[in-house]
Image (spheres, helix red, strand yellow):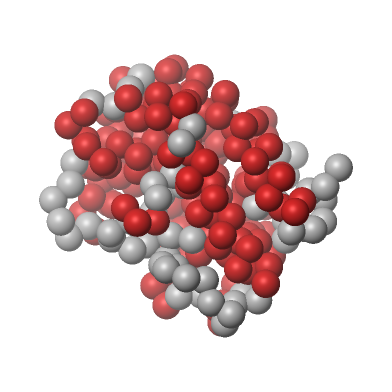
Amino acid sequence: MLPLEHNHDQGIPMNYLFHLYLSGNDPDILTGNLMGDFVKGRVGEEYPPRLRSGIVLHRRIDSFAQNQALFRQSKQRIDPGFGHWRGVLVDMFYDHFLAAEWNRWSKEPFESYLARVRRAVEGNYRYLPERMGELLPVIFETMLPSYRTVEGVGLALKRMSRRIQRPNPLAEGGGELQRNLAGFHHDFLEFVPLVQDDVLHFLCGKNVPDHCI
């Protein structure tokens, strides 16, 4: 989860699926969490309270990941030549495992989930940053479905690399996933319950239904 301050190219697709999955079912939390890569600086009063909480949750998840040993371990598995882009790659790799093994994490079929979440986000369209609104069809129709295969992640990284104006090594990132697939998968499986517990604590504190036991 690349922290917002390092996302110089606003709207770089990263771990959108992971953020959506951790949001639960509240439409405003889902929308705000997805908006996190597009909203910089102070979260103002122009957003409804739950939507603001979703944006804050996105940043909390990013911060949790960057300070978590398993996420850092995944970054260390990547060739140092990728530099700070290693965080972007880990984001994408974790989205891949979530998408590829979706039935392990959710009883709702993957395609149905994407359609339902898209409707929830589009219901808040008036609050979306312009660039995010433009990207919604790409995110839900092309990007997230492609994450289900290693090859799809590689192609997504190549597309991402071309969209970024400054030089970057992301086009070669798919090879890193293939090279150490088992290692990344291990880190992901160990990481998920830890971040879920942290998100549960946050959302319960916000009195979001279904998140307080």
Q: Is residue 44 above or below residue 71?
A: below
What residue lies at 50% left-to-right and 64% top-to-bottom? 35
| Furthest residue in direction left, as rendered | 167
The answer to which of 118 and 166 lies nearer the viewer is 166
Q: Is residue 164 above or below residue 49?
A: above
The image quadrant of residue 132 is: bottom left
Lateral position of residue 2 relative to residue 24, left or right: left
- Numbered label tally: 0
What residue lies at 23% left-to-right and 50% top-to-bottom? 161
Lateral position of residue 11 relative to residue 167, left or right: right
- Residue 118 pos. (x, y %): 60, 63
The quarter of the image holding the N terminus is top left
| Furthest residue in direction right, as rendered | 213
Residue 189 appears in the figure: yes
The image quadrant of residue 52 is: bottom right
The image quadrant of residue 172 is: top left
The answer to which of 16 and 82 lies nearer the viewer is 82
- Residue 141 pos. (x, y %): 49, 58
Lateral position of residue 171 relative to residue 30, left or right: left
What residue lies at 35% left-to-right and 19% top-to-bottom? 180
The answer to which of 150 and 207 lies nearer the viewer is 207
- Residue 73 pos. (x, y %): 40, 24
Lateral position of residue 121 relative to residue 12, left or right: right
Residue 119 appears in the figure: no
- Residue 179 pos. (x, y %): 31, 20
The quarter of the image holding the C terminus is top right
What residue lies at 29% left-to-right and 27% top-to-bottom? 78
The answer to which of 141 and 43 lies nearer the viewer is 43
Q: Is residue 132 above or below residue 23?
A: below
